[in-house]
Image (spheres, rainbow, N blue to C red):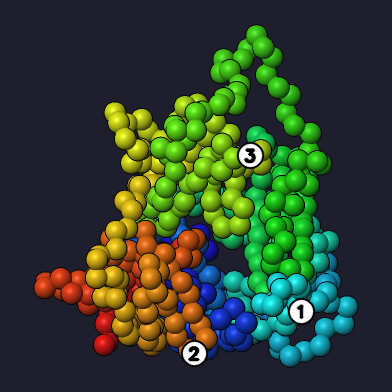
Amino acid sequence: MQHTSGLRDQWDLLWLAGGRDDDATEDEDVLAMIYRQRNLNFRPGTAFLYSNSGYTLLALVVQRVSGLPLWQFARDRIFVPLDMTHTFFLPDRFRILEGAASGYRMARAGGWGRTAYLNDTYGPGGLFTTPEDLVKWYESLGTTKFASGVLSKEAVRRGRLPTGDSIAYSAGLEIGMFRRRRYVGHGGNDLGANGYGMRFPDHGLSLAVVCNAREIDAFTLARQSAAFLIALPPAASPAKATVPADTVITVPLRELARFAGMYYNPSTLATRKVEVRDRKLVWARGGPGTPLDAIGPNRFRFPPGQPAELLFPPTVSGKPQTMLLISGATITQYQRAEPFVAPARGIGEYSGAFGSDELDVVWNVVARDSTLEFGTRGSWQQLAQPIFRDAFAIPDALVIRFTRDRSGRIDGFIADMPRTRGIRFAKRR
């Protein structure tokens, strides 16, 4: 429940196997995919990485130990005791629900379209509820409604790694600070749905935001609501202030240009792009990106509500090779990815058919000028941009690292996604 198992994420695996987000999914599909895996993301207990697979397995454990289907166990042991009268797991996705809000998604042809609920797999999702019922759940934390408070105590206890480091996650809840206020919360999304709930235990406030479209940012709406409902702590008096407030400065355009580029996390190979737009540094993660304020010659602050900074350690000359993303006590290091230089003969050597035994799928890779097109199952296609030698990426989704045999010829690739690492594809032809 603390996501330290190392299990690869089921949704990443199904996507890599050629699945689409509008495919129907059942427990059998998920279990078959988990059983095919021969490796983990990391040795169990040594790191934190969110994995929906663990929740699917936990739901099955509950069913086998209790002898009850999850929907009935949750109803009798959780929802009824908490008077959550409009919350349930749907036993059959084809059941007609009276009074349920329709889910919407951006249609491929543009505009909005309705979406159907497609999953018969429970644990990581599949819950139908209302914001009023979610508030009842959060209000129960810290009470003795469940087994003399045992569940509540475990739910708000930080996980800890063998190194002694704690993680900002407990038994199914995030633990963090918002505007110097301690909170627990969690969110999730699916086709046609997005939600986030929070509880501020020191102030007796619980809130929940649910939306009937994945594209609506429930997380930000919840934090904005919390900021409105909770008064900020009093500011430190000038006499006691020891650290001056950060002020926004202007960094010359030629200096900003030194920071721009593609960066990657050496551990996960996740890529992040930094650009210069309108004389500002921009954290480009799809869409319009996030403009950053300069609070130092090499230090940039995210907007209010996003307590994070970018720091570029100084170099003697040339472009910085390292970027640090600082969020609270967490520091994530990124390395600059040197520009990909296409060989004079083109990038045709990356083309071919590549198969994975762990996914039971074959990908067809086709070189398109300076990009690669990955496809399987007919119309399933994705374009990946080069990030450095033998590496291509779909930003925030997928990194492909090609491997070579002793003679230097491409013999396969390794696929990494945000919650799934090290999937090996071997070249078939």
Q: Nearer the viewer, residue 27 or 215?
A: 215
Residue 198 — which label? none
Q: Amino acid at mark 2?
A: Gly
Marks 1/3 in contact by CB < 8 Å: the verdict is no
First in sequence, mark 1 or 3: give its number.
1
Kindly identify the residue that appears in the image at 38 percent across and 67 percent down.
Answer: 370
Q: Is residue 47 above or below residue 102?
A: above
Q: Which residue is mark 3?
A: 303
Q: Position of residue 137 (x, y in %)?
A: 74, 60
Q: Amino acid at mark 3?
A: Pro
Q: Position of residue 366 (x, y in %)?
A: 37, 79
First in sequence, mark 2 or 1: give its number.
1
Q: Residues within 10 Å of mark 1 (few under 14, many from 20)?
A: some
Mark 2 to mark 1: distance in Å?
24 Å
Q: Which residue is mark 1?
A: 114
Query: Can residue 114 be seen here?
Result: yes
Kindly identify the residue that appears in the image at 25 percent across and 65 percent down.
Answer: 343
- With 188 as the anchor, is 264 left or right in this view? left
Q: In the displayed orientation, state which residue is furthest to the top.
A: 239
Q: Position of residue 301 (x, y in %)?
A: 56, 35
Q: Which residue is mark 2?
A: 378
Marks 2/1 in contact by CB < 8 Å: the verdict is no
Foreground: disc 2 or disc 1: 2
The quarter in which the C terminus is drawn is: bottom left
Q: Amino acid at mark 1?
A: Arg
Q: Residues within 10 Å of mark 2 (few under 14, many from 20)?
A: few
